[in-house]
């Protein structure tokens, strides 16, 4: 039985990933620079980019759960494997809190990928462009956001194809909530791109700490089957 707390927990960890937040800041910065007097374009562009990420990640989820479904015959052992994976991922995040280094393995976007990603994102000038770039940029986000998604997909793989769909929609809605919140905050003047970027940079170690603790706890619960 799939636990809503378990799936929501992994999705929340994914949602606060510094990597995803950083990309969203660059997207909104590009839209603001291209349309300094038209915040509506910024709003629509932010939503377009978020929609692209949501759709592509949902499709990825369908593929990952289908692949993991092949291991349904060894479900108990498989749950222990993904539990261990969650614990390892949590420890890597805790390491980034204790000794931070940009581009951490499986926790942040590799440094080698960042220049290309920034070039693509800075080309965004319209909602249509934001959607197209959003589709392309999801590939750059995968190395730093795919970990929790793989774990959640492993859990959801025990369900049939139709039953997985609402869970994947639920997961990805939580995943993009910070993107939606940032877009709305900029549009309504609650905050600025500079403030959000500065907050993210200032608190990046603490984001890794929160991610690490949640992942370790969820990993233990997944391994022991306590949430089943």
Image: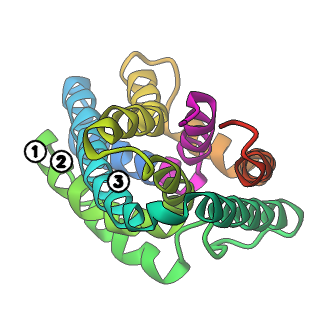
Residue, far right: 98
Tell me whether circle 1 and circle 3 mark residues in contact (CB < 8 Å).
Answer: no
Q: Which residues are magenta?
A: 1-22
| Residue at screen point 52% across, 69% down | 109
Residue 103 pos. (x, y %): 62, 74
Tell me whether circle 2 and circle 1 mark residues in contact (CB < 8 Å).
Answer: yes
Disc 1 marks which residue? 128
Residue 6 within the segment the image draws in magenta: yes
Of label 1 and label 3, which has the lower sequence position?
3
Q: Is residue 157 left or right of residue 128?
A: right
Q: How many marks?
A: 3
- Of badges 3 and 2, nearer the viewer stands 3
Disc 3 marks which residue? 61
Element type at mark 3: helix
Disc 2 marks which residue? 131
Label 3: few (<14), some (14–19) or many (≥20) C-alpha neighbours in 10 Å: many
Most foreground residue, 55 or 21: 55
Element type at mark 1: helix
Of label 3 and label 2, which has the lower sequence position?
3
């Amino acid at each position: 039985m799939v636990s809503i707390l378990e799936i929501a927990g992994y999705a929340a960890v994914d949602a606060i990933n510094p990597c995803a937040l950083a990309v969203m800041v660059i997207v909104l910065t590009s839209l603001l620079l291209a349309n300094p007097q038209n915040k509506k374009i910024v709003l629509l562009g932010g939503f377009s980019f978020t929609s692209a990420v949501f759709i592509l990640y949902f499709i990825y989820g369908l593929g990952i759960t289908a692949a993991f479904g092949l291991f349904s015959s060894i479900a108990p052992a498989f749950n222990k494997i993904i539990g261990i994976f969650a614990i390892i991922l949590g420890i890597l995040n805790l390491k980034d809190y204790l000794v931070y280094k940009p581009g951490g393995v499986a926790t942040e976007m590799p440094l080698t990928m960042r220049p290309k990603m920034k070039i693509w994102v800075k080309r965004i000038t319209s909602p249509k462009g934001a959607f197209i770039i959003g589709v392309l940029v999801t590939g750059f986000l995968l190395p730093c956001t795919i970990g929790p998604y793989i774990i959640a997909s492993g859990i959801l793989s025990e369900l049939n194809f139709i039953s997985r769909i609402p869970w994947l929609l639920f997961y990805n809605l939580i995943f993009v909530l910070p993107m939606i919140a940032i877009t709305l905050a900029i549009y309504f003047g609650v905050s600025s791109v500079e403030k959000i970027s500065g907050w993210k940079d200032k608190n990046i170690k603490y984001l890794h700490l929160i991610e690490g603790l949640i992942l370790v706890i969820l990993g233990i619960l997944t391994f022991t089957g306590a949430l089943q």
